[in-house]
Amino acid sequence: MTDQSAFHAGLLSPTAPIPAGLTDGQNRPAGRRYGVYRNNVTVSLREALAEGFPSIVGLIGRENFDHLARAFLRQSPPGSPLMMHYGAEFPDFLATVEQLAPLPYLADVARIDVAMRQSYHAADSAGIDPADLQALDENTLLNSRFGFAPSMILVRSKWPIGSIWHYTLRQGPKPTGNGEDVLILRSEYDPEPVILGAAAADVVIALQSQTPFGSAIETADDRFDLAMLLNVLLSRNAITALNY
Amino acid sequence: MPDASHAFPALPSRPGVGYKPQHFTDILNDPSPVGWLEIHAENYMGDGGRPLAQLRALAERFPISVHGVGLSIGGEARLDPDHLARLKHLCDWLNPASFSEHLAWSTHDSHFLNDLLPLPYTDDTLTRVADHIDEVQSVLGRRMLLENPSSYLAFTESIWSETDFLAEIVRRTGCGLLLDVNNVFVSATNLDYSPQGYIDTYPLDAVGEIHLGGHDEDEDDHGAPLLIDSHGREVVDPVWALLDFTLDKSGPRPVLVEWDTDVPDWPVLADEARRAEAALTRALA
């Protein structure tokens, strides 16, 4: 075992013995001085998770969150120094925690938090002028493929995750009802979760995979509101290219 | 890309502060307390968005110091080539006035631990750190500054004093040093030596930047004082006195106030910067 393997082993394991060869500078065992590093690591990772998952903190309270975060960070410490990406697997972890079974929507709400952070750091892009779209004749429009902002991210769920997110963080109305698909959009620098109907989400996915506009909307059912979707996308600068 | 005509060749011997996004508007409205800003490199490695937009705007007005916290220069493993490439990308884009990193490690077995972990001072670790610094300077194409750590414990296998260790690294690599006087105060208190004695044996000629920050107070198992480098409060008077002691010997240098947790409103941080300015003025007198 190398020096750093031994030092590392005890950092994420509170019951591991304090590594040999560490002193207080006066030849006495380091004792709780080693615990300073253990504490720094745990607290800094826990704080990063709490900052990254405001909706989960809001839903279950800080104390419960800290408990879950500690368990997560011990089994999944960051794999890179880019803390902005840390916690991408936290939603999957939440889905495996037995005590959270009464809150089956929690993992999907956490996916909104992950997507919000990804969107915040995504590359900048410029939205098309809505007039460019309006200027197309019908045939050209139907054959067009759309380019989207890298900051646009779709999160789908069988739970009303958008309403839960807004209720928790933005004093929105109490969530009721069915599953919701949430489209994260970043007009300039502030990502915003917009709730879409399932039909609109299907269309967005089809457009993202470069299906021509006409084919993407063809399969949508009666509940699909094309004008609403285009308005959402254009007003948040989400469409960055029209290829025809 | 920042306008290259605004590139600043070096940090001025004035106060700087660790930049926090919540101070963006305040700093641009009242830049007078600070002559430069420092950013943590890893917070600006995203693809875009507000962080890079703010940095672009600040770089037009201020010399910027890029301070890495994740390179793990003291690590047993080789430096992460992906991370080094990200640093190079950031430095090439920004052309900062300074780049600095820590005498510490933070990555092991592909785990990043988000803390600055200590290493013993031996011939082997000296060679390893010097090799890593050679690699950093070669990849970035610039001289880097290396920061002394806050220590909470000592290694029985250490055979070098920290100041001799740093001086030898400077001699081997040609790097400069970032002298954190709060870290000196914290380590000296924790390991029971004289902070002034440390400064007396420290290679001050190599210092390109000085750090100041707040620390917390705790106790070890024997009731001895154990100071924790928290960057969460004002700099204490004995650390200001150590700054005066240092500047008296070194002459004016760029001095940075770090405040990373429980970050205060701008006026509080600006007051700390003004106090650093006063210390720099005294050093010139």
Image (cartoon, coloured by chain):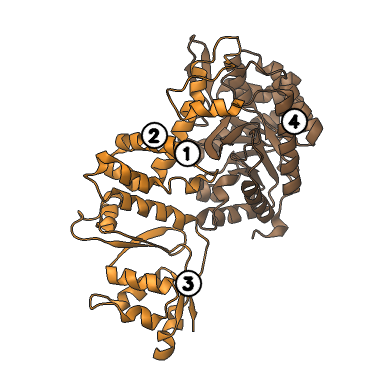
Chain colours: A orange, B brown
Report whether mark 3 lies on the same chain as mark 1: yes
Residue at label 3? A127
Give the crowd class for mark 1: few <14, some 14-19, many >=20 residues within 10 Å. Answer: some
Separation (CA) of disc 3 from disc 2: 41 Å
Q: Which mark is residue B119?
A: none
The residue that label 4 is drawn on is B127
The three-letter code of the residue at mark 3 reads: Gly
Residue named by callout 1: A77
Q: Chain of mark 1?
A: A
* Relative vertical location of residue A117 with respect to residue B158 in this rendering, above or below: below
Specify the subunit that label 2 lies on.
A
Q: Residue A37: image x %, image y %?
A: 51, 26
Amino acid type at mark 2: Arg
Q: Residue at x 48, y 79 (%)?
A: A242
Q: Quadrant of residue B174?
A: top right
Kindly report which numbered mark, 3 or 4, lies closer to the viewer in this rendering. Answer: 4
Q: Residues within 10 Å of mark 4 (few under 14, many from 20)?
A: some
**CA gap, disc 3 to disc 1?**
37 Å
Residue A70 marker? 2
Q: Can you give x and y, in whole percent of width and height, for residue B182 in the image?
A: 60, 26
Q: Secondary structure at mark 4?
A: helix
Please state the horizontal and vertical placement of residue A14, each as a whole percent of the image: 43, 25
Residue B8 visible to an observer of this rendering: yes
Q: Earlier in the sequence, mark 3 or mark 2?
A: 2
Of tags 3 and 1, which is closer to the observer?
1
Front-lying residue, A160 or B20: A160
Element under disc 3: loop
Q: Name the residue: 78% across, 32% down.
A: B170
